[in-house]
Image (cartoon, coloured by chain):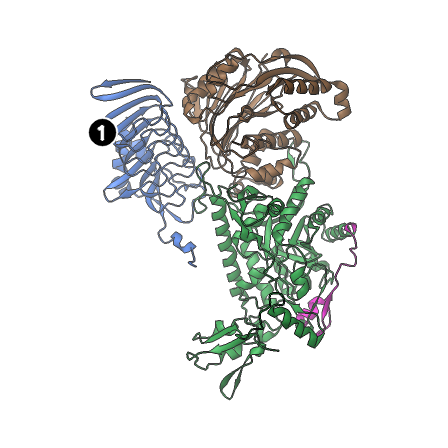
Chain colours: A blue, B brown, C green
Amino acid sequence: MRKEIVDGEVRLSGCLGERYIGCGMKKGVLHVEGTPGNALACYLDGGEVFVDGNTQDAVADTMNAGLLAVRGSAGDALAYGMRGGRVYILGDVGYRAGVHMKAYEDERSVLVVGGRTGSFLGEYLAGGLIIVLGLGCEGGDITGYFCGNGMYAGTIYLRTGKAPVNLSDKLILRHVDEAEKAAVLRPVVEDFASTFSLDAKLCLSGDFIAIEADKSKTYSQLYAAV
Amino acid sequence: MKKEGEVRISSGCAICGIFCKDGRRITGDAIKRSISVMHNRSNGLGGGFAAYGIYPQYKDFFALHIFYDSLSSREETERFLDRRFDIINLSKIPIRQTPRISDAPLVWRYFVTPLPHMLADSQLDEDEYTSRAMIRINNSIQGAYVVSCGKDMGVFKAVGYPEDVADFYRIDEYEGYSWTAHGRYPTNTPGWWAGSHPFSLLDLTVVHNGEISSYDANRRAVEMYGYSCNLLTDTEVITYILDYLTRKQGLGLKECAEVMAAPFWSTIAAKDEEERRRLSYLRKMFSAFLVTGPFSIIVGYSGGMMALNDRLKLRSLVAAQKGDTVYFSSEEAAIRVIEPAPDRVWKPRGGEAVIVSLERRGI
Amino acid sequence: MRARYRIRKDEECISCFKCAKECSFGAIGVVDGRLVFHHDKCVDCQRCVSSCPTGAVFISEDMNRFRANSVFKEDDIREIGLQASTGGVLLSSMGARDGQVPVYFDKLLLNASQVTNPSIDPLREPMETAVFLGQRPERVERGVDGRLVDNLPPHLELSTPVMFSAMSYGAISLNVHKALALAAQELGTYWNTGEGGLHESLYPYVRNTIVQVASGRFGVHETYLNSAAAIEIKIGQGAKPGIGGHLTGKKIVGDVSRTRMVPEGMDAISPAPHHDIYSIEDLAQLVMSLKEVTGYRKPVIVKVAAVHNIAPIASGIARSGADMISIDGYRGGTGAAPKRIRDNVGIPIELAIAVVDQRLREERIRDRVGIIASGSIRSSADVVKAIALGADAVSIGTAALCALGCHICASCHTGRCAWGLATQDPELTKRLDPDEGARRLVNLVNAWTKEIKEMMGGMGINSIEALRGNRRALRGVDLNVKELEILGIGYAGE
């Protein structure tokens, strides 16, 4: 791995599995080339990390603020417990992406995936926004099994007209109308598209569905106090 | 401290594998470089390699790799072997002394074939005859441990980081068409060479990452069929399940994967009629061999390799292909280090076996 | 006889006389517009207490005690007195209550995942409790095209590893049978007719019914056998191993008489053994004849009481062609049993499961049969422990009756059950609405299933078959070395 500083921005190249790159970074810009190791950008706290290559597991773990943009794929457990900021992955992501992401007042975590995701996307989602574009997978399954299981707040948007397989009955699925698309999705997707020099129109084309928790089905109904 | 077999020791790990579908034989250098990228996933308490196609001049003979604690255990074992096998060749396995590998046992190699009249009297096939003899050595000869006993293959393992184990065994001097590697992170062990991985039986080798929650259900089930899980490790029980299902029940590896990482009933219900019946049958027939909890395994065998994740995909596993070469690893970086530009990189889904085989047999 | 219980009321009583109406034992009467208590008739069934609108009725143990003696306890003296005055065999019902024999379930603790492998949240991730019970052939078979041939004999499929135990029509009411059948159907599990036959109105529940063939052969005919998903041969039950039984003539009325094909008002006798089974090969003959008459479409269960040599007995059953072995432990319940038998014969179910599972494994035939355990399964934790010891599934009798109102007063044999369960008195049986009863049974089993999933998830196990025989999931406390050895588990902390 080599490190150089260009115009005040740090550039790491030749990465091969080095862990914890960008951990807790508060400010500045970091460019990463190669295959950085696990726990990339964990606790990221305001800085910007750009990766040219695939990333591994536990990326953006408990991230608080800032931007992580990966021109490649991500492994399992992406953005676990994320609290705020933006995670943009151009390609596919593994199992359990966006588990228990959060939002509170002005802080909102945003995860956008250009490709498709593994199973258990957005499990236990507590807030924030997950958008899966499924670019190049049009018409196919883009989320695997058990999408959004146990989520209790936040929204998962999928660029597809098809409901995910075996969606939990504790979730509500709805089609996204043009107004919502313009108000909620367009600003985020345009930012994502410009980060990777994609055509934003293409990224926003076609049907979107939204998945949210059915607030009438709380887990407290499960219990009988002794 | 108690060693493997006296107590159940859980461990995390790194695994990787390289398979040349065209039968091209490559040295152990690549697998060493691959596993060493994942140094952090091991803790120096175990590393090892399995290699296939490394003994072409002896490919019709069982290659035995044996650890001895003492000269007397060697003498006793050789007497035992002599009575049952024709020993074609025997030698110390060449090693390179390194300060990072210590307390080495005596490591010997034999090429053997069952004595014809003994084999005939036993009414067993030569695989069963040989595996029973090896299990007997492990169970009854104090200080002797058979590390591997397949044909045209071998296991090299030790207490240490895998890259140091590679140097110790000089694996860069072997050429094989298939390699797997393991770096171990046990939660507690005094460091016993035999307790390192890969674990093997005949030509079957397994490297494994994870800790299974079904261990005792699987162990007690497979022990019904004559296996004895002496090491109390997941890898051992997984190896025996695979041996039972393939060699004794005649299942294919894909079917084994459908037993061990069976699809959920809800997933089976969504399949077409024929597939639903087939998968239901396998689950019902072999329910005791469902393996739950996190695991990723790479299974080596003569002519092929299988990688498999648990059905919830609780451990990481990456696959890649470049031309005729297929790579598996716990981390993508461990593939990129030896193949910077694969044609394809993918992450197999939970329970989805990736099986690769020789397309034409290499020499 | 001196009263055992005392009935009291306090000033909250509004003299509605509901308690008197509800008491089926004649312990509360109304004389001159006033409640009168006949304490000696009270069995402490709690019906009056439960039905009192103002909470004004109280049942307590009589404060008068016999002089304490460390050898001759109050019950001993009382029972000697009873036998001296009557010359009779002591009769009781429900399960053993002797506190001398440990409840091993209470000495077993479950494991959970920490760090080295993850626990699983059953509310969010799939968690499978479906159980398939039946024989497995030794080897797979393939057709000429190499495809697997389905050579599995018929299996029972349970959505959750809990079934309802055998309780006969006669011992309990038709309404109870109906509630059990409805609940089994909704839950995707099975109920068991017991030995008194099957009322015709319940034939439609064929997919969820297990019919029993016992020594009395009550109500056994070809239609009966084919109106079930499986057939159970009852050799014995945990409450009274080795003896037969008789159903009091008070319960042989109307359709019970017709279904059992015995005269009204006469005690119905179940012989102690099956007189066509004097040895294990005779059992095989009965198993196979039942398969013949049902076209080999129904699995056959053999139910035995847990006795001293249960392991070899189970081995013999496994080799008899039976598909499942149902083992009923020492604490199992009954509608009527001699008290001395109930309290002194047999062994606890936990030990029986452990030795049978181990023995069948040693003989390499464990996969050939399913094991169903019963005899005081009280909660989901007992279910999980029974399965970890080696059972495939459990069945519940007493717990199911409790869900329907039973308070275990152990007076089933009187035929006067105030909860309308163990009685044939039409005024009493109507106290149970079968639909409401079914709803309560469904709730109970669903709640247990959720708890089973939580416990499995905590151990990182997401399918019930990975729990079966997984004895490392268990550790013992307050057990000696021999007990640990028989249970096949380590001590807590090991």
Name the residue nearer the viewer: C328 or C228: C328
Q: Is residue A8 left or right of residue A149?
A: left
The secondary structure that most of the magenta stretch takes on is: loop
Q: Residue furthest bottom?
A: C32
Tell me: residue C492, above or below residue C306. above
Answer with the quarter of the image where residue C121 lies. top left
The amino acid type of the residue labelled 1 equals: Lys
Residue pictured at 52% horizontal, 52% vertical: C381
Q: Is residue A130 left or right of residue B147?
A: left
Residue holding disc 1? A27
At mark 1, the secondary structure is loop
Q: Is residue A211 left or right of residue C283?
A: left
Tell me: residue C476, above or below residue B90. below
Question: Does the magenta-highlighted stretch encompass residue C236?
Answer: no
Counting every numbered tag in the picture gives 1
Residue pictured at 42% horizontal, 58% vertical: A225
Residue pictured at 71% horizontal, 63% vertical: C219
The span shown in magenta is C252-281
Name the residue nearer the viewer: A122 or B292: B292
Q: Quadrant of the N terminus of chain C?
A: bottom right
Residue C12 pos. (x, y %)? 41, 78
Name the residue nearer the viewer: B103 or B232: B103
Q: Is residue B275 left or right of residue A42?
A: right
Name the residue nearer the viewer: C222 or A48: A48
Question: Does the magenta-highlighted stretch encompass residue C254?
Answer: yes
Residue A126 pos. (x, y %)? 33, 44
Chain label for disc 1: A
Residue C371 pos. (x, y %)? 64, 49
Question: In the rendered image, is residue A166 in sight?
Answer: yes
Question: In the rendered image, is residue C470 in sight?
Answer: no
Dot 1: few (<14), some (14–19), or many (≥20) neighbours within 10 Å? some
Residue B143 pos. (x, y %)? 61, 23
